[in-house]
Image (tube, grey):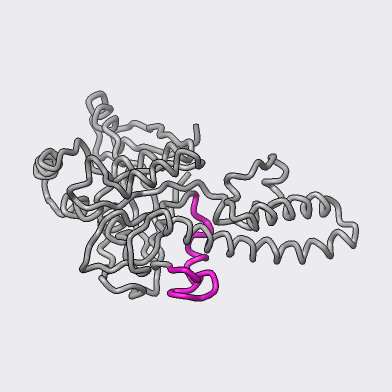
Amino acid sequence: MSLQCGIIGLANTGKTTLFNCMSNVKAETSQFAFTSNKSNLGMIRVPDPRLAELEKFQVTEKLVPAVVEIVDIPGLAKGSSEGEGMGNSFLADIRDTDALIHVLRCFDDENLMHIDGSVDPLRDLETLDFELQVRDITSVEKKIQRTEKMVKAGVKDAKATMDALLKVRQHLENFSNVRDLDLDENEKRQIQDLSLLTIKPVLYVCNVDDASAVTGNAYTEKVMEFLKGQNAEGLIIAARLEADIADLESEEDRMEFLRDAGLTEPGVDRLVRSAYSLLNLCSFFTVGPKEIKAWTIRK
């Protein structure tokens, strides 16, 4: 199976910088908001030292790591669900993703203005959650209208579908994400075709300045405290620092850079592992003289 993650966030959070160092695809970045009108697609190789260990037992022509597909959508803003900023044109690009990586701005930079005038990651988190909830309500409402006709016509299982839809709509109208709603397996099947955005598991990435890469800062403390009560995980990553590491040609130079920064491994490696854990995935290996390959499977 292949894993696809969507990178989302408000404009000027550093999410495209993070995408670039994750995928080595050099998408355009800018200090101006809403300069992109298209999504970027890239692939991440999943770091796994077991591949090299297996090569000790089987001489092979190549090592093939598992990959994660990532989609970086245009920056969003308050009102995106109603057409502000780049509007809701991104929805088709993240509809089929398995998980969302929500990048939060946790750094100050007077040369890179926040679209709301000040840095407040919890406000940004709530803003984007609201926009996704509004889009999900729209999707649910459309299916309710179709299902009402089916209930009147006596279509089998239409009543069960309607009950599930009404339950989900009420939850969304209370400004809550569907992933936090207790749904049984039958209810999940009734809404599966909607590919709701707020039902997807989410990993929050606190993008910090270089000096905060190891210890975090006051912004990340607020985010991590908030996430304790949520069904979500948070990571601290300095995207600009990660980009500098990714630009180095040799593994030796990258490791030396990491040590100088007080890090033991690239933040991108931690991010990929967290995405695997979030989706309850693992790797298995096929071994042969042509290739040793890692495959992604569910646990």
Report x, y in % for residue 164: 74, 50
Report x, y in % for residue 247: 16, 54
Identify the residue shown where x is 42% and y is 46%: 203
Q: In this rendered view, identify the residue nearer to me: 233 or 173.
A: 173
Side of 54 where 67 appears, left or right: right
Report x, y in % for residue 55: 24, 29
Q: Main secondary structure of the magenta part?
A: loop
Identify the residue shown where x is 22% and y is 53%: 209
Identify the residue shown where x is 31% and y is 61%: 16
Q: In this rendered view, identify the residue nearer to me: 173 or 49.
A: 173
Report x, y in % for residue 220: 33, 46
Q: How many labels does the image show?
A: 0
Q: Is residue 287 above or below residue 43?
A: above
Q: In this rendered view, identify the residue nearer to me: 1 or 246.
A: 246
Asked whether 266 falls inside the magenta stretch, the response is no
Q: In this view, does 222 lie above or below 59?
A: below
Furthest residue toward top: 57
Side of 268 where 144 appears, left or right: right
Side of 281 where 235 appears, left or right: left
Numbered range of the magenta stretch: 77-98
